[in-house]
Image: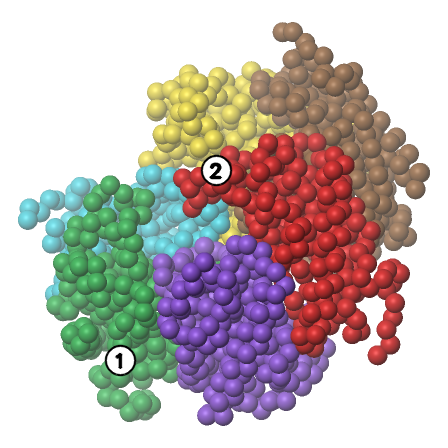
Chain colours: A purple, B green, C cyan, D yellow, E brown, F red
Amino acid sequence: MTITPREDGRADDQLRPIKITRNWLDHAAGSVLVEFGKTRVLCVASASEGVPRWRKGSGLGWVTAEYAMLPGSTHTRSDRESVKGRVGGRTHEISRLVGRSLRAVIDYQAMGENTIQLDCDVLQADGGTRTAAITGAYVALADACASLGVMETLTGSVAAVSVGIIDGVPRLDLPYVEDVRAETDMNVVMTGAGSYVEVQGTAEGAAFDRRELDALLTLAEQGCADLTRLQREALAGG
Amino acid sequence: MTITPREDGRADDQLRPIKITRNWLDHAAGSVLVEFGKTRVLCVASASEGVPRWRKGSGLGWVTAEYAMLPGSTHTRSDRESVKGRVGGRTHEISRLVGRSLRAVIDYQAMGENTIQLDCDVLQADGGTRTAAITGAYVALADACASLGVMETLTGSVAAVSVGIIDGVPRLDLPYVEDVRAETDMNVVMTGAGSYVEVQGTAEGAAFDRRELDALLTLAEQGCADLTRLQREALAGG
Amino acid sequence: MTITPREDGRADDQLRPIKITRNWLDHAAGSVLVEFGKTRVLCVASASEGVPRWRKGSGLGWVTAEYAMLPGSTHTRSDRESVKGRVGGRTHEISRLVGRSLRAVIDYQAMGENTIQLDCDVLQADGGTRTAAITGAYVALADACASLGVMETLTGSVAAVSVGIIDGVPRLDLPYVEDVRAETDMNVVMTGAGSYVEVQGTAEGAAFDRRELDALLTLAEQGCADLTRLQREALAGG
Amino acid sequence: MTITPREDGRADDQLRPIKITRNWLDHAAGSVLVEFGKTRVLCVASASEGVPRWRKGSGLGWVTAEYAMLPGSTHTRSDRESVKGRVGGRTHEISRLVGRSLRAVIDYQAMGENTIQLDCDVLQADGGTRTAAITGAYVALADACASLGVMETLTGSVAAVSVGIIDGVPRLDLPYVEDVRAETDMNVVMTGAGSYVEVQGTAEGAAFDRRELDALLTLAEQGCADLTRLQREALAGG
Amino acid sequence: MTITPREDGRADDQLRPIKITRNWLDHAAGSVLVEFGKTRVLCVASASEGVPRWRKGSGLGWVTAEYAMLPGSTHTRSDRESVKGRVGGRTHEISRLVGRSLRAVIDYQAMGENTIQLDCDVLQADGGTRTAAITGAYVALADACASLGVMETLTGSVAAVSVGIIDGVPRLDLPYVEDVRAETDMNVVMTGAGSYVEVQGTAEGAAFDRRELDALLTLAEQGCADLTRLQREALAGG
Amino acid sequence: MTITPREDGRADDQLRPIKITRNWLDHAAGSVLVEFGKTRVLCVASASEGVPRWRKGSGLGWVTAEYAMLPGSTHTRSDRESVKGRVGGRTHEISRLVGRSLRAVIDYQAMGENTIQLDCDVLQADGGTRTAAITGAYVALADACASLGVMETLTGSVAAVSVGIIDGVPRLDLPYVEDVRAETDMNVVMTGAGSYVEVQGTAEGAAFDRRELDALLTLAEQGCADLTRLQREALAGG
């Protein structure tokens, strides 16, 4: 198997240029435009009083998320889910993942019976949209907590990155062209403290062995550590 | 009735600061971020071969549009229509208006049996989102036609602006705070040549008389002329 | 351009034969069969205690409307929206227009926290269904207010008419055959006192100029005045 | 148990005043306004070339029906199914019943690969809407077959009537006030030749015995015979 | 017409082998796997406190049912209604029939404001799924009432069977191969005391006469009596 | 932290009693009732000619899956997704997982342009429904391939198991009572040859570290090996 170098010239363990722009909107409690290379996701945090019905009277808060792609965000236009009248399986799956990831660093008690909703809308998609969404949503969430004066709600930070095996070589942060060619594809969500929140690995072509799995996890750990640092710098820069 | 000056200090016949950023995305045939003050709309033009079934074999092309608001674009978060499972009446109405407005300057014959789809997604809403959408969508459409080498498809340009009567005074390009207070609210779509494509005037409070209607039309004519100039400058600057 | 006379022999500024039949049903608070030529719309007003949730506790009433076409009302059968599972854009748009038009002559305070719902169902469509719906719905609404003993809820009357330019000539109250040929098509809603409630003009083919717009408005003013007189006669005849 | 006479003074085996108005609309292949007392149903037959996909190439035609109630047709307004986004169980059930009933007298071979769609819309509901719908739809269908020149498609006629037991007494053609009080409720569809097409009997309160069932069937047979005669007279009168 | 004997060798008035397995699941208040030959339906009764909104404060309970077919239950796989996004007419119709049948033997007063929901899911379909569902659901309902200690809620039992005319011969309990060939098809629901709860007869091919109807009713009475005995034995065996 | 032994007395690395019953239905190409303790899933494979539109003409086959839970399968009845009118996020997610897992051992070329659809319906849920579904669906798929005479379509086998950390201890094959208490929950899909197809680990409470992740993977490897042996025995037993 010939190994072709990455199209964008990156090292295998290198992130794409990452850009985190806070307060991208004027009204929202927290709003972040996060860019992983050409992938651009707008992450908006909205706070509201009260919690969903099944949680009322518990004294606990709630954090939830919705992910979606704009029709023009993909290379070929994709149909609008509102027009189709139903949310697709992939959208559902990623919305649930983003919510679960953020809830890993939430102290519901400290929130009181309030809800923070994260909306992650992909403006341009070039691979890694769900990991960019998680990484940006955390920053929007932190801004919302700060503006609401409830920073103690956050027990840590979360970031996420994709890794995959292309031509037998493990690589970090796959753009679309690599994503479609990957034999194995894994999304890893980690806390700023270096623990795992979520690991989702899928054999796209051939099944993968334990050694490959280990290599991918090691690569992802480093990528998440880098993203954690970039999140901190962004939040410090406010 | 005391007349309060405009909160943003503008003259009654003055547009908000208008910004038209072309090629805002990397892949799309045409993509424009249009800003009318704090209102920000992303307009993306996607071209595809073929036309809807009812038009097949006619030799004619088709142009259509979809308008939507991101959940976090409004002061208070609005529910996602994909999650509600149906497109709301207002969304439908505006999508139809945008499509109709653009079709006023299309030569279907020149297009051949191809379709251009305009997606206008409101990233931040502060009044006048539909008029910003039309104004920006035209520029995205022009870029798409240029990139497809079919500029002869366009028989002219279109721009749109809102006008309204606040405290008895006709004003141009209403932001949200004025929009909610307006007694009468009108959206006007005009060609670059100064003809009307669409006039939609609504008495929000009291009904209005012919004299008021005339004053609003005159104001809108001037606003559309200004927007036409800004569109031309943006397209020349590419 | 050769100007062909109207198929039904009317003068350009003449309404079709208008027929307003009150109490067309036995149970409803108000029920009117309105006919503009072959266009027949059944307008039913139903009163209920209470208001929508967002209005509760305000002390104010609410008036709303739904418009729909029976499948067999059109020349070629149109699919039932209940079967398609969604209300189409045109239906949404007209329902909203009818509601808005009626609300222009309502004193919510005088209603108390009650709701009147207008249902306008097109039994046969031959152009001008929305204007017939508004004109008939007002009469049904007046009957409902009378039967509920709250006539002071009505601060005036509303009527609506379509106007358009065919072969360069402005004409009043277009039947289907003229509607499809119209270069410009405008629906105008006016109060009995002669003020504008809604103006919706659309260039179907070529854009129109200010002079044409003025001619259409003048024609519509006269048509609405005629309809207002016919509404009064119908209500007096009860 | 005291037996109260019928509110409208009818004998127990007497139909309400039946009125069948043909060609109630101007365009449709067949259109009938059928009245069973205050119950009024508009039945419209629309013909189209072709058959549903699963029947293509069979050389056989198809007849289908849709039943619906206008929101204002009931004593208390009922919500519009298009707005609810789904057709209710009762509506589905009756639409299927009407279609099945009409198909009992169709020679598909004689139709060729064409479809006739019957739309039965209840304008005013006062009990027996489904039986009125079937009875009127047959007349509209006959008119459609005549206008299409395919009368040989009809192998007979169908009519339907409701019967029920009130205070222990079997009665024919129940209006709403009787329907809600009936212990047993049965709808019977019969051919003009006196055979059964459909029998649907339901114990609303107590279960019923074979003797009661027999009495109801005998009553229904006579009612259907009367309706068959009225259908013939209406069709002769055209 | 040649009369072919039944494929499975049964006499015309003989049921298929009937099997009623109680407590088929571990958690449910009542759960029954009922088999009519190869037709297998899982009937589960779930109890919950409270009643639907329209019944609150009445002091009365409620019993309702939902019927559905698993996609793989039919000879050719049928699409999943959850995926299609809407419940079909046939499903609606049968769900309503099952609920109505069970409610015929319920004393709502004795239940108090509680709800029992019956879910009848067809695991394998070979004709008579709705009658098997009713027959099994009654047993699951009885088990639920027993486990809730409210046996007085049941005022009797219900069972159901299909009958039909094949080649001119009335037959009991039709499997799929007979069902598709039946000229007339009837479902009969009866109480254990031998009264009728529901009679639904449909002419699939030719209309049927009173004599045939009588023969079918007699056959069904005997089949329901047999099923009632089998239900009692099953419940005694617990 | 006190470690409580498993309620069902199993060792931490022991599967629940596993039962795989083939040919559970009479008609289907493959049908398996799989039981992991009290969890019972019916897996049915249906074959059909042709492939989805986007795959036509490729010469390649397709395998897809749908997962669903019966309303009565859970401790507290869950609403039917067909009635809610939409498939929930969890259902979507698991359906996609099952399909992806099976496709890992398919040679599309060998299938030709045919489709096999797997339906996995949970009859009783007690934890691990998705892993039982995958394990059972593979056996149903193998039976379908055998009956179609295309065993070469299968390039291997797949099985799946859940693992989790409860009170700090890694455990295999969690029932519901353990699942709700697990700090970390992981589903692992492996081929019979011992390679990974899918790894999905989620921190339910605290995030987990690399050492815990490794322990879970080792446990899952052994569990999948055991399941693979049981699948082989079941298939040999046919």
Chain letter of disc 2 in the image = F
Q: Is residue F118 visible?
A: yes
Mark 2 and mark 1: Cα distance apart in space: 53 Å
Circle 1 SS class? strand
* Circle number at residue A125: none
Q: Position of residue D200 (x, y in %)?
A: 66, 31
Q: Position of residue E149 (x, y in %)?
A: 90, 52
Say left or right for A206 vs C214. Answer: right
Q: Amino acid at mark 1?
A: Lys
* Circle number at residue B19: 1
The residue depicted at 48 percent of the width and 17 percent of the height is D155
Q: Position of residue E159 (x, y in %)?
A: 79, 33
**Relative depth, front residue between C194 and B213:** B213
The residue depicted at 49 percent of the width and 92 percent of the height is A236
Q: Is residue F76 above or below residue B3?
A: above
The residue depicted at 70 percent of the width and 25 percent of the height is E175
Q: Is residue A202 above or below residue D208?
A: below
Circle 2 SS class? loop
The residue singled out by tag 2 in the image is F113
Q: Nearer the viewer, mark 2 or mark 1?
A: 2
User: Crowding at label 2, few (<14), some or many (≥20) Cα neighbours within 10 Å?
Assistant: many
Q: Amino acid at mark 2?
A: Glu
**Relative depth, front residue between E13 and C72:** E13
